[in-house]
Image: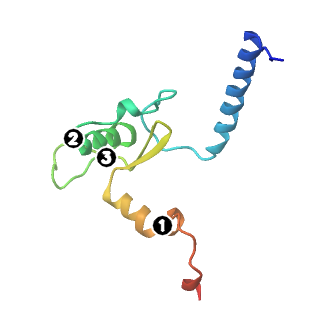
Amino acid sequence: MAVQISLPHFSLAVAILVVLKWLTSKKRHTLPLPPGPPRLPILGNALDMPKHDIHEAFRDMNVKYGGCYSYSSALTPVHDRLVAGDVVYLEVLGQPIIVLGSHETALDLFEKRSAIYSDRMPSVMVEL
């Protein structure tokens, strides 16, 4: 005996699954994300990823989405210059990407706070 499902029942089931997935996926981000370009629904920021001159494109993103003005500079004493921001968030096909805009920020996150961001299990031998 074959089970037949009508199109309205199938559509309703798919709609319920999509809504449940959407509701459960929104709860995983409890803290606000860093600023970044607006994302498309499925692609995310895949169209924003640079193909050439990656360092310049990421610097421009940091200036646009995380930038601040610096009014004093040894290199340009007369003119104001735009300094890259610290952190920009991208999401490409579901993969989160963090772009750090300064060397000081990278040192702070990777060296000074490495215990927070490491995925390694704590070593029992080090604690002895």
Say above or below: 91 vs 107. Answer: above
Query: Residue 76 versus residue 28: which sits nearer the camera?
Result: 28
For marks 3 and 1, give the one nearer the viewer.
1
- Which secondary structure lies at badge 1? loop
Structural crowding at the residue carrying mark 2, measured as other residues with C-alpha within 10 Å and reported as few (<14), some (14–19) or many (≥20) = few
**Residue 121 rendering spot, x and y as whole percentages:** 57, 70
Mark 2 in CB contact with mark 1 (< 8 angstroms) = no
**Residue 29 rendering spot, x and y as whole percentages:** 61, 44
Q: Is residue 107 left or right of residue 18?
A: left
**Residue 3 rendering spot, x and y as whole percentages:** 80, 17
- Judging by the rendered image, the residue that carries numbered circle 2 is 53
Say above or below: 113 vs 1. Answer: below
Determine which of the numbered discs, if any, sits on residue 84 in the image: 3
Determine which of the numbered discs, if any, sits on residue 113 in the image: 1
Determine which of the numbered discs, if any, sits on residue 37 in the image: none
* Cα–Cα span, label 2 and label 1: 30 Å
The amino acid marked with disc number 2 is Asp
Point out the tag, 2 or 1, that comes first from the N-terminus. Answer: 2
Q: Is residue 105 left or right of residue 91?
A: left
